Amino acid sequence: MNYYRTFLLLVFVFAIQLAPAQTEEERIEAEIINIQRTVVGKLTGHEPIKGKKTLSSRASASERKITADFLSNSLKEIGLKPERNDYNVKNKKGDQFQGSNIYATIPATNGSDEYVIICAHYDTVENSPGAIHNATGIAIAYYVAKKLAELEERNKNFMVVFFDHWKSNMIGTRMFTKMLQTEGYNIHSMHRSDYMGWDNDEDRAIEMLASNLSLESLYRIESPVPIYKRTVATPESRFFSNFGYDTVTLTAELKNADNSPFVKQSSDKYTTVNFKYLASTTSIVYNVMKAMAKE
């Protein structure tokens, strides 16, 4: 019996020695996926977001409030101090809009007054779980904020922002930008992700619209995958540019038709998200932000 046990132990030790060691790249990918599965899962109703409560979409006032609370608590969990940019406004037609943008600052360690903003909208169209549009954008911003907060040195301030009311003529974005203008923030650049998480051809390529060559070059330097240049401005990028802000918009390959066919539908679910692709894009964004933190 002792010989048998010794034999099994030797086989076990030998098997461990033969097993391929996990590379650092694989470890990072696994870490990102583990965190982002939880974020996307809760935002899309794949798993409960609070107690036994699951979301069907993030369109109604009640579900957007639950989402805002979840995002605020999630920022607290990574050591940040979340704030709310609440608004209650009417448009020219007299329609009332009440909501909350959730944000947190990751302060510079050198006293800089420049802010780099990493953002995404958290609401959806009605009856859509909004996985790729835009729980994945939230997941990118959240993970990047978490890792930036862990850096020992940051030569710029970073701000993570989750916008409300995108589907209503970007009311949340408009109100938050108004706050930035009123309070005189010195904005270095704004970076947003949307429609990210579908990669049918499995090349992990992304599409990018950057307002200047310096920002575009930085992403290309940090990207091991193809980056296609977007030629059509998004409403958000035009809006930010109107205020003089440099911007970057990241999406899946919209121009090459490699984007989720389920966007804005009830089928835009957690199960359609390619989390390896999402992790790849997230890693690129973080590496860009880390490079900015050293500038």
Image (tube, helix red, strand yellow):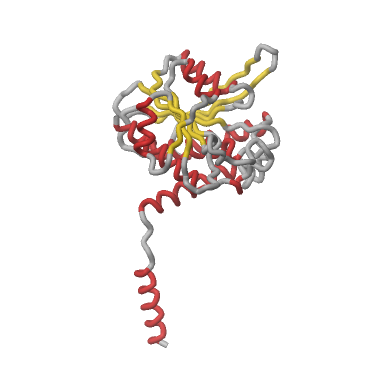
The part of the image, by quadrant, that contains residue 287 is: top left
Q: Nearer the viewer, residue 4 or 28?
A: 28
Q: Residue 177 location, x and y as percent?
A: 50, 19
- Asked if residue 41 can be seen in this view, the reply is yes
Q: Residue 209 location, x and y as percent?
A: 46, 29
In the rendered structure, the answer to whether residue 98 lies left or right of residue 113 reads right
In the rendered structure, the answer to whether residue 3 lies left or right of residue 175 reads left
Q: Residue 229 location, x and y as percent?
A: 45, 32
Q: Nearer the viewer, residue 292 or 164?
A: 292
Q: Residue furthest top?
A: 92
Image quadrant containing the N terminus: bottom left
In the rendered structure, the answer to whether residue 38 lies left or right of residue 248 reads right
In the rendered structure, the answer to whether residue 127 lies left or right of residue 49 reads right
Residue at point 59%, 43% (across, down) = 42
Residue at point 58%, 45% (across, down) = 41
Residue at point 51%, 39% (across, down) = 139
The part of the image, by quadrant, that contains residue 91 is: top right
Residue at point 61%, 48% (across, down) = 271
The part of the image, by quadrant, that contains residue 100 is: top right
Q: Residue 264 location, x and y as percent?
A: 65, 35
Q: Residue furthest front?
A: 256
Image quadrant containing the C terminus: top left
Task: Tell how many labels.
Answer: 0
